[in-house]
Image (cartoon, rainbow, N blue to C red):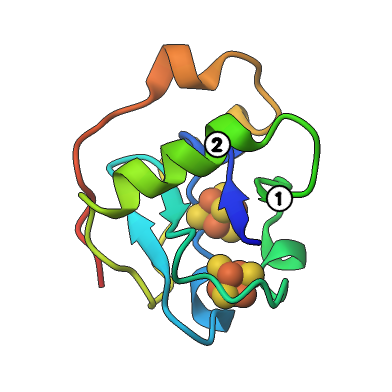
Amino acid sequence: MTYVVIDSCIACKYTDCVEVCPVDCFYEGENMLVIHPDECIDCGVCEPECPVDAIRSDTEPGMETWVEFNRKYSEIWPVIFERSDPLPDAESHEGEDGKLEKYFSEKPGQGT
Ligand code: SF4
Ligand code: F3S
């Protein structure tokens, strides 16, 4: 089992989640993070840290697609384990619908 990051993170990227992860399994894209499903130990400590509820257990319905999404990009993007500033206008994108279609970027982030 694993936790995953869903599209609520896109265009926000608060990064409160990364510093609590005991195994450093968050990876950074240009405008969101993902979790490597094979590295996550399912401890759950990151889930309450996200202010926009973007971290979910794969036991929730409909998460299969997000597990594969997280796996794909965690193998391409750099690891991040230090908190950084949220994206500009993060607050205005909280809770917005359709973020994957509107804003998602496959480009890597800077990483830690
Ligand atoms: Fe890291 Fe635990 Fe969150 Fe998995 S559930 S990403 S191991 S903090
Ligand atoms: Fe994204 Fe939430 Fe972490 S917005 S960067 S999953 S704290």
Q: Residues within 10 Å of mark 1 (few under 14, many from 20)?
A: some
Quadrant of the rendered structure where residue 106 is? Answer: top left
* Ligand 1 found in image quarter: bottom right
Residue 56 disc label: 1
Residue 90 at least partly seen: no
Quadrant of the rendered structure where residue 61 is? Answer: top right
Where residue 59 appears, as percent x and y from the top left, is 77, 49
* Residue topped by disc 2: 66
Describe residue 65's horizontal placement relative to residue 111 as left or right.
right
Q: Amino acid at mark 1?
A: Arg
Residue 21 disc label: none
Q: Amino acid at mark 2?
A: Trp
Q: Is mark 2 within 8 Å of ligand 2?
A: no
Where residue 57 appears, as percent x and y from the top left, is 72, 53
Where residue 112 appears, as percent x and y from the top left, is 25, 73
**Proximity of marks 2 and 1: CB atoms separated by less than 8 Å:** yes
Mark sitting earlier along the chain (2/1): 1
Q: Is mark 1 within 8 Å of ligand 2?
A: no
Q: Nearer the viewer, residue 101 or 38?
A: 38
Picture layout, residue 48 above or below residue 98: below
